[in-house]
Image (cartoon, rainbow, N blue to C red):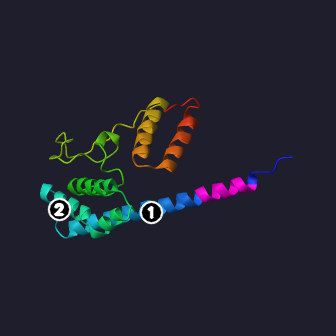
């Protein structure tokens, strides 16, 4: 007779659920703090131009709390850079900050800043049409979201997206 794994497996599942809750809370805390900072910058009259955006980026990159956290290995320097780039874009484009705001616009980020290397000179995001669609288009959108989840190291989100895609098409492949 084999020993039942159910009780042990339930503990593992509970640990994952608890981790997901902590990660979600941390993500929400980061987004809230970044947005509050951007709101404070706007209230202080920081201009929505190259000078204002660069000042915001420099302030984030130069924040002692981030310098110390990077030195202690608590946060990666690339994460700080991504936060700064996303904040610069959000401020310049008068948009809400979100974790992937720094990535290319075609990957779900905000438009590049006009003076940056990746810019096409555009200053307004344009969403695609959703008036007509099909499962194939939805699966392509999920594939793009999966790329973002991988870039952002969001393993739980990646798993959820794969589950959703498999529900649409049981033969879904990445």
- Name the element at disc 1: helix
What segment is highlighted magenta in the picture? 7-16
Q: Which residue is labeled 2 in the image?
A: 55
Position of residue 164 relative to residue 75, above or below, is above
Residue 86 in percent (x, y) is at: 28, 54
Q: Quadrant of residue 29?
A: bottom left
Q: Secondary structure at mark 2?
A: helix
Residue occupying the point 49% across, 45% down: 158
Examine the residues drawn in magenta and state their main secondary structure. Answer: helix
Is residue 86 in the magenta section? no
Q: Residue at x 44, y 36 (%)?
A: 143
Q: Is residue 12 covered in magenta?
A: yes
Q: Is residue 129 left or right of residue 42?
A: right
Relative to 43, residue 173 above or below: above
Distance from the alpha carbon under mark 2 to that under mark 1: 26 Å
Position of residue 68 relative to residue 90, above or below, is below
């Amino acid at each position: 007779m084999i020993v039942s794994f159910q009780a042990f497996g339930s503990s593992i599942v509970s640990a994952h659920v608890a981790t997901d809750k902590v990660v979600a809370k941390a993500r929400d805390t980061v987004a809230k703090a970044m947005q509050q900072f951007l709101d404070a910058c706007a209230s202080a009259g920081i201009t929505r131009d190259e000078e204002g955006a660069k000042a915001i980026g420099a302030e984030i990159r130069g924040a002692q709390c981030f310098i110390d956290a990077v030195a202690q290995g608590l946060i990666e320097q690339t994460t700080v850079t991504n936060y700064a780039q996303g904040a610069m874009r959000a401020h310049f484009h008068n948009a809400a900050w979100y974790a992937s705001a720094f990535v290319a616009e075609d990957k779900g980020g905000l438009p590049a800043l006009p003076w940056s290397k990746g810019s096409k000179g555009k200053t307004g995001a344009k969403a695609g049409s959703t008036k007509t669609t099909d499962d194939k288009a939805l699966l392509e959108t999920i594939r793009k979201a999966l790329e973002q989840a991988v870039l952002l190291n969001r393993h739980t989100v990646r798993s959820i997206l794969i589950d959703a895609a498999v529900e649409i098409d049981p033969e879904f492949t990445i």
